[in-house]
Image (cartoon, rainbow, N blue to C red):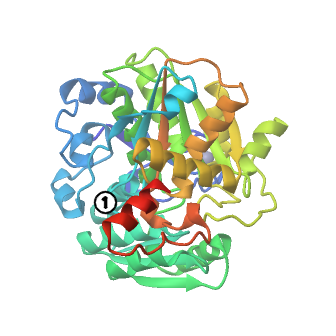
Amino acid sequence: MSAALGLVCRTCNRIIPESDFRMVCDTCRTPLEVGYDMEKLKQALQKRTPVDSGASLLESWRGILPIDRPELIERVYIGETQTPLVKSAALGRTAKVGALYFKLEMGPTLSLKDRGTSLCALKALELGFDTLCVASSGNNAASVSAYAAKAGLRAVVFIQKDTSASKIFKMLAYGTRVVRIDGDMSTASRLCGEMLRRHRWMQAGGPNPYRLAAKRTAAYEIVHQLGGRAPDAVFVPCGGSAGMVSAYRGFCEMAEMGMIPSVPRMIGVQLSACEPITRAFEAGRDRVEPVEKRPSFSDALMNNTPYWGDQALEAVRRSGGVMVSVSDQEVADTIRLLGATEGLFVEPAGAVSAAGLRKLAASGSLASMDTAVCMLTGHGLNAPRAAFGSEPLPPIIPPEVAAVESYLAG
Ligand SMILES: [Zn+2]
């Protein structure tokens, strides 16, 4: 038996058995979360701390995940492991952070989504679903497509009209029936919701409680990789905000179990083009309201009604963190900086965290810290042109040494 108690509503404290799977509380409409027996969680961590970073993610963290049938892990494994924590060469120094680390959340389908999808696919098998569906701006649809393919499940993915071709080809490569909706993300989400009322499918995105349960292992990994210490701050890109809320839950659990002295400051970063959580934070509100969206070069993070928005706001406030927004230009500059000085190629939605760190450091509003972690949540190949606009490719050089020397000297 796993350490999970069932699905918990944090508003009315009702606990629903996992076999009665649903995503939100019938009474409060609050997204449900997996609840844990903290004593069992503690025992599981004492018994097996992951040592082999090459092992599958679900196998590594099995003791703290709601997994009842571990024999199914290999049926959903496509190479997701613990992700690297890489020390910064340059940005940490300019931002005056003692030690800055990048958490490279880029799984087998090149984004953070795989951490959550692996468990969703396993639970779909455990609970007897035959179809995984998702409404997505692209990365989650690609991730769900891949895991469904491996698990022998059907994937139905709803994407917005302007999802990038590089992401669509990923979905097609995994053999998925792609439903490309004439509309934006909210239209795709509405359609997905209507189809869910007609079919017994598992929604692998949105407020799926297993996504949050699996994603919180990123916080455990960070502490494990830092030798049992928690960083002073964690910078997290915020769209739907499962990443922010899950990391916060993970750190809170570790603090409750006495593994770390306190929860790091959680710093959420949004795109200025769509910043409902930053606006609510700055206005001192408890609730996130939709804002008017502006065009952006990023197709991800443009979530105006984030499922976990209110909880993300609470995580940021309770941890003493802050919400900050960055412009497309600031993100584009950061992508090029990460590439040229750190050797990391990151897509816009993944680079906003580093852009937020740079912005806060430049404004002098970053409190001094010894250790910080920046979550980089998607590979640059998901949107390879993003930081380059209409910049032409390098010129063609005549195949002569003199021409090469002259070009390199230029
Ligand atoms: Zn409730």
Residue 2 in percent (x, y) is at 28, 41
Q: Could you say whether the residue bearing mark 1 is in a helix, strand or loop? A: loop
Q: Nearer the viewer, residue 224 or 195?
A: 224
Few, some or many residues within 10 Å of mark 1 (<14, 14–19, 20+): some
**Mark 1: amino acid:** Pro
Can you say whether 312 is above or below 384 in the image? above
Using the rendered view, name the quadrant where residue 101 is placed. Answer: top left
Can you say whether 111 is above or below 171 in the image? above
Which residue is pictured at 45% across the width and 62% down the height? 407
Using the rendered view, name the quadrant where residue 62 is placed. Answer: top left
Instruction: Name, please, the residue furthest toward the right.
Output: 283
- In the visual, does 116 lie left or right of 367? left
Which residue is pictured at 42% across the width and 33% down the height? 89
Residue 365 in percent (x, y) is at 71, 25
Residue 310 in percent (x, y) is at 68, 44
Can you say whether 310 is above or below 394 in the image? above
Q: Is residue 110 visible?
A: no
Q: Nearer the viewer, residue 246 or 268?
A: 268
Residue 160 in percent (x, y) is at 60, 76
- In the visual, does 364 lie left or right of 336? right
Quadrant of the snapshot with the N terminus: top left
Which residue is pictured at 66% across the width and 35% down the height? 314
Residue behind mark 1: 108
Q: Nearer the viewer, residue 31 or 389?
A: 389
Q: Is residue 163 visible?
A: yes
